[in-house]
Image: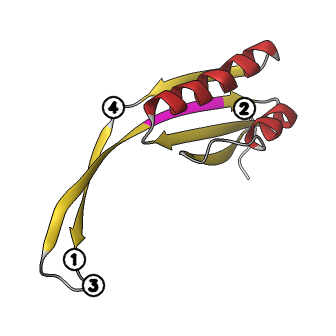
Amino acid sequence: MTFVTKLSFESGDRRVLEETVEDLHRTLERKGVECKGPHAFSPERTRVQLYKQLRPGDQFSPWEYTVYARKLEIHGSDDIAREMVDRDFPDSVHVEVEVDRKKPLGHGRD
């Protein structure tokens, strides 16, 4: 069975996000790992209401920020995928990891 490691990155700092994902992608290419991506998504604008007290009432101006997202998939190479996930990522980059198990074609169902 083959494992696919899906990495999702989100950050409000586009430059740091791009540098982080590109560095990871270059490292994977140097190691000869099959990888898809990075895939970019449209930036998402988020608006948060800020209240002057702990109850609804007087408000400050809403806080608005943009979240940028990228995705990368590592096919097989479980040991290298584990090594990449164990890296220290910048605090401004949120990383989520999902591992899928892929069965070969024609493999019976469990």
Q: Give the mark, 2 or 1, whose residue is nearer the N terminus.
A: 1
Along the horizontal axis of the image, is 99 left or right of 94? right
Q: Position of residue 48 (x, y in %)?
A: 26, 60
Proximity of marks 4 and 3: CB atoms separated by less than 8 Å: no
Along the horizontal axis of the image, is 10 left or right of 6? left
**In front: 26, or 32?**
26
Q: Residue at x 66, y 23 (%)?
A: 23
Q: Position of residue 1 (x, y in %)?
A: 81, 37
Marks 4/1: CA–CA distance: 32 Å
Q: Which residue is mark 1?
A: 52
Residue 105 visible at all? no
Q: Secondary structure at mark 2?
A: loop
Q: In this rendering, is residue 5 above or below 110?
A: above
Q: In this rendering, is residue 58 above or below 20?
A: below
Q: How is the image coloured?
A: secondary structure
Q: Which mark is residue 101?
A: none
Q: Which residue is mark 4?
A: 42
Which quadrant of the structure image shows residue 83?
top right
| Label 4: few (<14), some (14–19) or many (≥20) C-alpha neighbours in 10 Å | few
Residue 14 visible at all? yes
At label 1, the amino acid type is Lys
Marks 2/3: CA–CA distance: 59 Å
